[in-house]
Image (tube, helix red, strand yellow):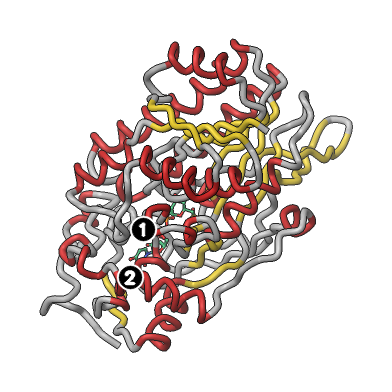
Amino acid sequence: MRIAVLGGDGFVGWPTALHLSNLGHEVHILDNLSRRWIDTELGVQSLTPMDSIQERCRIWHQETGRRIHFHLLNLATEYERLKSWLSEIRPDAVIHFAEQRAAPYSMKTDRHKVYTVNNNTNATHNLLAALVETGIDAHLVHLGTMGVYGYSSVGAPIPEGYLDVQIDTPAGPRQQQILYPTRPGSVYHMTKSLDQILFQFYAQNDGLRITDLHQGIVWGTHTDQTRRHEQLINRFDYDGDYGTVLNRFLIQAAIGYPLTVHGTGGQTRAFIHIQDSVRCIELALQDAPAAGERVRIFNQMTETHRVRDLAELVARLTGAEVAYLPNPRKEAEENDLIVKNDQFLALGLQPITLAEGLLSEVVEVARKYAHRIDRSRVPAVSAWTRDIAKRVEHDPEGRRLRSVS
Ligand code: USQ
């Protein structure tokens, strides 16, 4: 297949491009390199040293003889160029990662909220409008998030995208399936909820063939392909905006930083290893909906964990200390989470679950590159509201530490 990977320079986009190229697909990355600009804005860098995207593609060719093509284009602002590009490439499938993906970044200031909404919503809508206008019948696979469901304890398993409801009509009760009501917890998660409505409309109105992957928190850093050469290495975020919880704990353990649990750590979230993440995309590509079908939604996760349990596990494994900090986010302190993921299991996914070996591998990577870490960038200081901002802990290593277990 000829596959366009939009956002193919990012944390999941890059290993996906490699994985698909390795399977023999013709891969075209489209990216505006915004993630690299955001690093510059925040004054942080990936823990792992990343080469330019052009250099990464050159090394991939050198190692495998396969070519990955790179195109510099801003999906959210360059609509006419996008149409020309799509008409030229005519992909069989489009994988859409090209959105600002960090909840804390989206909540930093009003400017970051505006940027995230403009960027993410325009990127998705430009893509949908351009597919219709160019008449390209590509299977669109979108990286959505488990966060669209929200994190209140509902007591029932979260279904894959659609909820069975019963509606009372004059003729009696009728069964229907509706998009699961969204309850986003950040501006970023809100944009992914808006994406769902855009997909629903274009699938119904224009027969676009769309799969939306509701992904959990990705952990790990290497995949089989990124391991092949030092210069194919994946990016690896540790800072308070882009670092995600389990990877942050593992990096913190590697540098002797207290593990930064927000609040009680009673938040339960869905997780998936990066190797499974790229495998899921391969599986989703093999199972495209037909034109006229509703959007296919998968829960792309393999297990759920409570944040404090993860901290305790990492502490046990590495001897790290755990710090319980005031939560910079507005979120339920404690929640339960049961998630259905039957569709990927039925397609053959064999989940990689939390195992000591894999956790230790991440700690090893972090130790190797520990000299690149700026400790002052580790705390999460982006607050969800002005009131919360007053209690944010800027110095978890300092004397103001509330408790260390
Ligand atoms: N947390 C801590 N300590 C930390 C960092 C996070 O306790 O140092 C807590 C947060 O308060 C939150 C939970 O861990 O309760 C998860 O935070 P996260 O930063 O790992 O994940 P999140 O902000 O939800 O976003 C990440 C990705 C996003 C993806 C989402 C999937 O950045 O792109 O959509 O995970 S999900 O969480 O399932 O919605």
Q: Position of residue 95 (x, y in %)?
A: 57, 36
Which quadrant of the structure image shows residue 106? top left
Q: From what the image shows, is residue 353 above or below residue 158?
A: below
Q: From what the image shows, is residue 311 above or below residue 395?
A: below
What residue is rendered at 71% in x and 59% in y? Answer: 349
Which quadrant of the structure image shows residue 120? top left
Q: Position of residue 134 (x, y in %)?
A: 60, 12
What residue is rendered at 42% in x and 68% in y? Answer: 246
The furthest residue to the left: 399
Q: Earlier in the sequence, mark 2 or mark 1?
A: 1
Element assignment for label 2: helix
Question: Which residue is more in the foreground, 46 or 107?
Answer: 46
Residue 161 visible in the shown view: no
Question: Which residue is more in the foreground, 230 or 324?
Answer: 230
Mark 1 residue type? Phe
What residue is rendered at 27% in x and 58% in y? Answer: 240
The quarter of the picture where the N terminus appears is top right
Question: Which residue is more in the foreground, 358 or 58?
Answer: 58
Identify the disc placed on residue 236: 1
Q: Position of residue 26 (x, y in %)?
A: 60, 34
Position of 370 compared to 91: left or right? left
Q: From what the image shows, is residue 90 above or below residue 56?
A: above
Mark 2 residue type? Ala
Q: Which residue is mark 2?
A: 366
Question: Which residue is more in the foreground, 69 or 94?
Answer: 69
Q: Is mark 2 within 8 Å of ligand 1?
A: no
**Mark 2 and mark 1 residues within 8 Å of each other at the beta carbon:** yes
Residue 72 visible in the shown view: yes
